[in-house]
Image: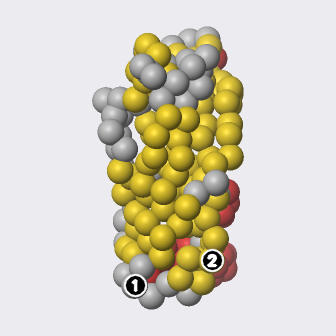
Amino acid sequence: MIDRTDQGPVLGSGWIQAIATLIAIAGGIFLFATWKLPEYRQLAITVFAISLIPWAITFYRFYRLRKAIGKATLDLEFPIPLGFSGTATYSRPMRDAELRSIEASLQCEEEIVKGSGRNRRTIKKVVHREAIAPIVTPMMDRIDVRVPLRIPESGPASFSCEVAKTRWWLRFDLKMRGCPDTASSFEIEVAPGIASR
């Protein structure tokens, strides 16, 4: 079952959150390792407190973003067939922010699981990526973005099993004024068969 909600990443690239998490984990490990040594205990507490600062900044940026804009929705009937040509509508409430620019793209990803046990690994590959020119309709309290969407007839249909997946995505990168930049991703279900003309 495809999750039709916005899958972000909310704060754009996930690298910042990943680095903040690693720093917090390293601070926690140092605190745990030196807690039984009284001469280092105060230093350990200080290091751990400092290691939480990147996550505190990330949380504050998330709070600002959620306060300024609402959750995004995508209006598109699922599933759609190969060769589909139509329009999807991306909508998002705006409260204390303004959209500066938006980029949209259609992307198809293949995931293959190789090996088993400890040697099990997932390989991801982008097999189709196409930039889309969105049409923005600004309003007082929201934005509506019309996205001309065309699925290639030769493209693979959506597919999922234990060792392989084919997934189609509509992705949006939003540059904002008044809050941090953000991004949206919606998985779209592409059915086998060619759209009738």
* Residue ID for mark 2: 100
Side of 177 relative to 88 (left or right): right
Q: Quadrant of residue 103?
A: bottom right
Q: Nearer the viewer, residue 171 or 9?
A: 171
* Residue ID for mark 1: 140
Q: Secondary structure at mark 1?
A: loop
The percent coordinates of residue 123 (x first, y second) are: 65, 24
Q: Nearer the viewer, residue 146 or 141?
A: 146
Q: Residues within 10 Å of mark 1 (few under 14, many from 20)?
A: few
Q: Nearer the viewer, residue 54 or 78?
A: 78
Residue lying at 60% horizontally and 83% vertically, measured from the top left: 177
Residue lying at 45% horizontally and 88% vertically, measured from the top left: 96
The C terminus lies in which quarter of the figure? top left
Tell me which label, 2 or 1, sits earlier in the chain: 2
Q: Nearer the viewer, mark 2 or mark 1?
A: 1
Q: Amino acid at mark 2?
A: Arg
- Number of marks drawn: 2
**Where 100 falls versus 187 (above or below)?**
below
**Where 149 falls versus 74 (above or below)?**
above
Residue lying at 31% horizontally and 29% vertically, measured from the top left: 1
The answer to whether any part of residue 48 appears in the image is no
